Image (cartoon, rainbow, N blue to C red):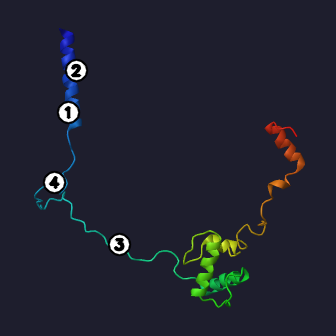
Amino acid sequence: MASIRATLAMAFIAMLIAVPAFATTARRSSSTSPVRRSTSNSRTRSSRKAVPKSNKMHGQQVIESARVTEIQQALIREHYLTAEADGRWDATTEAAMQKYQADQGWQTKLMPDSRALKKLGLGPDYSNAINAKDSSFAAPATSGTTPPAQAADFAAAAGVSR
């Protein structure tokens, strides 16, 4: 009899603890309530107006004249442009750049692609970098120039006999 009372007491306590967990605390949205009452209560939210999106242009819009001259000279060197380098980004220069990018299999854009500029030899200049005086910006050695002793060690470590 005592164990039944203890079991019932435990079940009652568990129910008291569990009931608040199942109570809903979500607010109704304005679409479900038929009438929205305005109150002067400080807890009510003020209606927020949607902020209009900015029509501001992003990204680079104009290429500097000196840079256009460099690009034109590179396009002339690669035989994509026949006009003289005058520093103006005109339709002829734009068409030559688009043709160059298309021939490389890249997306043609109004502004030059960074891959195209690098391939034309107009990539970033690191000569004024902090550690540039001690560095050589030479291309890394090819895999065929591994010294024979080192290649033998690699083969031995991999379990390959030569």
Relative to 20, does residue 45 appear above or below in the rendering? below
**Would you name the residue on which mark 4 appears?**
32
Q: Is residue 89 visible?
A: no
**At 62% from the left edge and 73% from the top edge, which residue is drawn?**
101
Q: Amino acid at mark 2?
A: Met
Q: What residue is shown at x 21% (from left), y 22% (from top)?
A: 11
Other residues around mark 4 within 10 Å, as few (<14) / some (14–19) / many (≥20):
few
Which amino acid, by three-letter code, is at mark 1? Val
Residue 122 in percent (x, y) is at: 68, 76
Which residue is identified by label 3? 53
Q: Gap in Å between the C-alphas at discs 2 and 4?
A: 40 Å
Q: Residues within 10 Å of mark 2 (few under 14, many from 20)?
A: few
Q: Quadrant of the N terminus?
A: top left
Give the side of residue 39 with respect to residue 152, left or right: left
Q: How many marks?
A: 4
Disc 1 crowd, CA 10 A, few/some/many (<14, 14-19, 20+) = few
Read off the residue under disc 1.
19
Tag 4, which secondary structure?
A: loop
Task: Find disc 2 in the rendering and name its residue.
Answer: 10
Between marks 2 and 3 in the image, the one whose residue lies nearer the viewer? 3
Position in image of residue 84 (x %, y %):
68, 91
Q: CA distance from mark 1 to mark 3?
A: 46 Å
